[in-house]
Every structure is written in structure tokens, then in C-alpha cells.
Image: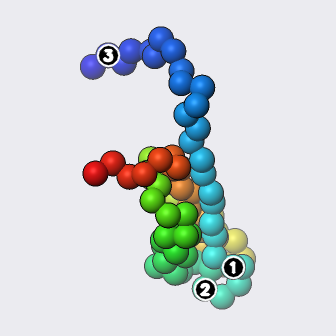
Amino acid sequence: MTHERPTSVDPGWTIRHFSQSNPSGSGSGDVAALLRRVADTLDSLGDVQVEDLTFKSNVAAGEDDLTITVYYDAQPRRR
């Protein structure tokens, strides 16, 4: 499979992102709680097109320190 390099870039296209983690302390490793928080944030953004998600986990003070980063376009979702 070959990948072609784009010949031009649309200067009006911008990818946006946000990252969220659980509060430090007891429960910081709760994946389901973090996913709910990310879903609530996405709902608050309205109709956006999510392009990618990344999940990161680091052990800190005996519990996982979780972070989810969401990359999105402010354009409405493709139907």
C-alpha cells in the first residue's frame, strides 16, 4: 500500500483537541468514570466530528493516572 502526500493543505481546516483525567487520589484509576466525563464533555461541544482518541495510563502513588485525549473537528458529524 502506498500513501500519497497531499499536494495542498486547506488553511481553513483545524483539528481541535482536549485532554481529561480523573481527579487525583482515590478513584483516579476509574476508567468508566473517565469515559463518562469525556462523553459529557463531547455532549457539551454539540455536533462535532471526532477524529481520534488516545488513552494513556501511568502508575502514580500506587494508582493509575489516566488521561484521554480527544481530537475533533468542529464540523458536524458525517451522517
**Which residue corresponds to mark 2?**
27
Total number of numbered discs in the rendering:
3
> Mark 2: which amino acid?
Gly
> Mark 3: which amino acid?
Thr
Residue 76 image point, x, y percent: 42, 51
Q: Earlier in the sequence, mark 3 or mark 1?
A: 3
Q: Residue at x 52, y 74 (%)?
A: 40
| Circle 1: element type | loop
Residue 46 image point, x, y percent: 50, 64
Give yes or no for contact between labels 3 and 1 (Cβ–Cβ under 8 Å): no
Q: Earlier in the sequence, mark 3 or mark 2?
A: 3
**Which residue corresponds to mark 3?**
2
Q: Is residue 66 above or below residue 61?
A: above
- Report whether residue 34 is seen: no
- Report whether residue 35 is seen: yes
Which class describes the residues within 10 Å of circle 3: few (<14), some (14-19), or many (20+)? Answer: few
In three-dimensional space, the C-alpha distance between marks 3 and 1, rounded to whole angstroms, equals: 43 Å
Q: Nearer the viewer, residue 79 or 24?
A: 79
Give yes or no for contact between labels 2 and 1 (Cβ–Cβ under 8 Å): yes
In three-dimensional space, the C-alpha distance between marks 3 and 2, rounded to whole angstroms, equals: 45 Å
Which class describes the residues within 10 Å of circle 2: few (<14), some (14-19), or many (20+)? Answer: some
Q: Residue at x 63, y 60 (%)?
A: 19
Q: Is residue 21 above or below residue 77?
A: below
Q: Is residue 26 above or below residue 24?
A: below
Picture disc at residue 23 = 1
Residue 11 image point, x, y percent: 60, 26
Q: Residue at x 58, y 31 (%)?
A: 12
Q: Is residue 79 above or below residue 34?
A: above
